[in-house]
């Protein structure tokens, strides 16, 4: 209901867009195949019951509505103006809508014009919106659909049977917006938005709007970029607070290491590293394809979430497909539940002779009394403490007319008699009979269409429980204000930090470092070695050498004066007289910790396999600072090199807790000083049974 004369509408511009009560349709038409006709058709298709004002000087009436020759002649300020006009007319249409008092606009125009001096068309449109406090969806998008609000603000066809439900889908891709709208799974949507170029209103605003609606219980994002990182993080934080799962598909990955070639940390992080860190911090589930996204949407749309247990239990009717399931689950690191002997005993008692009681279970024997065998086996799995979720892995192929109710009824019975997450997983989407799948979905049973996408979705479900079960993070200890201000001042100076100063920076922030001295002559190097005690390491300190090993500028394990003199002469002749002499660290595993500043999300903390193969192995994990020791340990646990830290072939376990603490301390440094550096490389960090120690540091100040 619109406010009365003189009353102020308290809704924001975005609320008045997405929940509009009055709409002007600029460019409305009755011409078959035209954008103007489609815009009107979509309002009618959705059942919009607010005020509609077609605008087109060529008509007196469109679809039974009076048609106005100009927006300025519409009799009231509208919540939303849908501008179905070409680029050449969009600026004037935008200005007229603003003059009318429209609080929001949808535009499908690309907003492209030939480059010229002065602001671009997109910038001029944005300026009009800013001056009048207008929200703008687009340009170069497909608009939006508020399903329960019966508002379809789009110029493109949407399905007649679009269902209301728990999912909000926000997309930078118009085609993906349309694809999900036309899904044949019966996914129910609360809101679909094709945000386009986001010249004014960006995805984070739609996200935060959706999360204030109780009707949104699952969020799916297709992301090309993040234009407002603080707002985006606030939206993700709100989703975590509301316990609303967020699924994200990022596109347009590029190799950002070209812009950060000085530091290994930047090359390792790459363009996608920031997304990984942000998603991990807020429990976002990253999907790899639209197929995985819709499987995960369907699974998370079910009211059942993992509340206990550790792994998946599955029942199959094929030994070969069961083996495929196990292979792919192993590849994906999806936990298979380790069920108890008692559970296996219950299952063995019901199976046909010759079948092995196991998880995953191939329960198909003679086919006689199969329904009972499947149901009782699922009941046994459901009662096992280690089972978090269950999957009925069968190919939903129609076996004749009428429908064979066998597997369908088994699924219904299991669903009705259990409380843990349960789904039917078909191995081949192309073979799924739509009728059978529809009957299961109408009963609320998720149907996943593909072994890989289904397994990934189940892993997201387990990961969701793991993330929700994390202990509340504790903020790591800050450094004294004087330390922070001193280093901020130093990093603001033009002179680069040499290795010794970089190591002092680390030490001031609580990262253990080796004892080190500088020298510019053989005599000084000898004195430094005698002071430190042999064995020592000798490294070039030439200002032009960022990565010393790459320049053959490192000599390790020097045990005496003669060996030191020869090593110094070689380095000085090739790379210059400046060197550092350092105490040798205890033998251990070489790791790499670092900081890289992402252009969008700011500083990230990195932990990786270290040494000379740091970029070859590309084994790394990234986190969003600050990180406590527990969060740092989770990063380390994700590394492929992680088992080596536990000791192999008789080696003693390394002090992983010390490494985690060093990573946590680096995160404090990143939070305090990350805006002043492009990257910090600490490579290697030697992790041994008695602790960890940084033996080298490269600090790359922020480029102006």
Image (cartoon, rainbow, N blue to C red):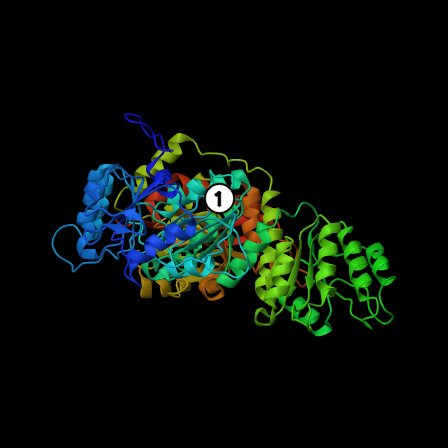
Residue displayed at 41% across by 53% down: 45
Q: Describe the element under mark 1 as helix, strand or loop.
A: loop
Q: Name the spot of residue 216 as percent of width and height, x first.
A: 50, 44
Residue displayed at 75% across by 52% down: 382
Name the residue at the left extreme: 117
> Which residue is more in the foreground, 670 or 419?
419
Quadrant for the N terminus, please: top left
Pointer 1: residues within 10 angstroms few (<14), some, or many (20+)? many
Q: Name the spot of residue 534 as percent of width and height, x first.
A: 51, 54
Q: Name the spot of residue 23 as percent of width and height, x first.
A: 32, 44
Q: Is residue 117 visible?
A: yes
* Drawn side of residue 679 relative to residue 638, left or right: left
Residue displayed at 18% across by 53% down: 89
What residue did someone put label 1 on? 511
Q: Tell how many labels.
A: 1
Name the residue at the top extreme: 6
Where 485 sits versus 7, above or below? below
């Amino acid at each position: 209901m619109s406010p009365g004369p003189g009353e102020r509408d308290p809704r924001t511009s975005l609320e008045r867009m997405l929940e509009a009560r009055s709409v002007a349709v600029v460019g409305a038409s009755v011409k078959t195949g035209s954008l103007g006709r489609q815009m009107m058709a979509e309002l009618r298709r959705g059942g919009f019951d607010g005020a509609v004002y077609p605008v087109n000087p060529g008509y007196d009436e469109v679809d039974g509505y009076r048609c106005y020759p100009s927006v300025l002649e519409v009799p009231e300020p509208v919540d939303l103006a849908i501008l179905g006009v070409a680029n050449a007319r969009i600026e004037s249409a935008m200005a007229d809508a603003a003059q009318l008092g429209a609080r929001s606009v949808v535009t499908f125009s690309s907003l492209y014009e030939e480059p010229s001096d002065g602001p671009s068309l997109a910038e001029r449109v944005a300026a009009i919106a800013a001056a009048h406090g207008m929200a703008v969806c687009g340009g170069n998008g497909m608009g939006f659909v508020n399903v329960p609000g019966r508002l379809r603000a789009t110029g493109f066809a949407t399905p007649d049977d679009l269902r209301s439900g728990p999912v909000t889908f926000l997309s930078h891709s118009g085609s993906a917006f349309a694809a999900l709208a036309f899904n044949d799974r019966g996914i129910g949507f609360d809101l679909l938005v094709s945000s386009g170029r986001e010249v004014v209103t960006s995805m984070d605003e739609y996200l935060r709007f959706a999360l204030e609606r109780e009707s949104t219980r699952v969020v799916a994002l297709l992301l090309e970029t993040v234009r407002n990182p603080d707002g985006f993080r606030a939206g993700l934080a709100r989703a975590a607070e509301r316990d609303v799962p967020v699924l994200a598909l990022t596109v347009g990955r590029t190799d950002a290491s070209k812009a950060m070639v000085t530091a290994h940390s930047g090359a390792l992080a790459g363009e996608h590293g920031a997304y990984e860190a942000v998603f991990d911090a807020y429990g976002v589930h990253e999907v790899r394809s639209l197929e995985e996204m819709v499987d995960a949407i369907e699974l998370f749309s079910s009211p059942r979430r993992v509340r206990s247990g550790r792994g998946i239990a599955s029942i199959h009717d094929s030994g070969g497909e069961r083996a495929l399931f196990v292979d792919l689950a192993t590849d994906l690191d999806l936990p298979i539940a380790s069920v108890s002997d008692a559970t296996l005993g219950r299952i063995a008692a019901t199976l046909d002779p010759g079948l092995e009681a196991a998880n995953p279970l191939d329960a198909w024997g003679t086919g006689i009394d199969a329904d009972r065998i499947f149901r009782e086996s699922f009941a046994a799995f459901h009662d096992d403490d280690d089972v978090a979720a269950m999957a009925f892995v069968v190919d939903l192929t129609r076996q004749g007319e009428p429908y064979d109710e066998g597997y369908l009824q088994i699924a219904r019975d299991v669903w009705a008699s259990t409380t843990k997450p349960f789904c039917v997983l078909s191995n081949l989407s192309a073979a799924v009979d739509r009728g059978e799948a529809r009957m299961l979905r109408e009963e609320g049973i998720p149907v996943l269409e593909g072994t890989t996408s289904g397994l990934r979705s189940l892993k997201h479900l387990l990961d969701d429980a793991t993330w929700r079960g994390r202990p509340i993070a504790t903020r790591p200890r800050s450094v004294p204000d004087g330390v922070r201000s001193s280093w901020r001042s130093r990093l603001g100076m033009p002179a680069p930090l040499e290795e010794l100063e970089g190591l002092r920076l680390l030490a001031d922030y609580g990262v253990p470092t080796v004892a080190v001295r500088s020298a510019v002559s053989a005599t000084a190097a000898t004195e430094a070695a005698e002071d430190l005690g042999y064995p020592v390491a000798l490294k070039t300190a030439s200002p032009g050498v960022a990565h010393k090993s790459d320049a053959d500028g490192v000599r390790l394990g020097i045990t005496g004066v003669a060996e030191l003199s020869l090593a110094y002469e070689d380095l000085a002749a090739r790379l210059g007289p400046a060197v550092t002499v350092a105490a040798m660290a205890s033998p251990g595993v070489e790791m790499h910790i670092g900081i890289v500043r992402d252009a969008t999300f700011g500083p990230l903390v990195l932990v990786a396999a270290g040494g000379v193969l740091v970029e070859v192995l590309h084994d790394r994990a990234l986190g969003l600072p600050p990180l406590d020791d527990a969060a740092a340990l989770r990063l380390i646990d994700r590394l492929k090199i992680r088992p080596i830290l536990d000791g192999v072939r008789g080696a003693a376990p390394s002090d992983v807790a010390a490494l985690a603490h060093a990573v946590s301390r680096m995160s404090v440094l990143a939070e305090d000083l990350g805006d002043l550096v492009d990257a910090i490389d600490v490579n290697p960090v030697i992790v041994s049974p008695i602790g960890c120690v940084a033996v080298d540091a490269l600090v790359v100040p922020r480029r102006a």
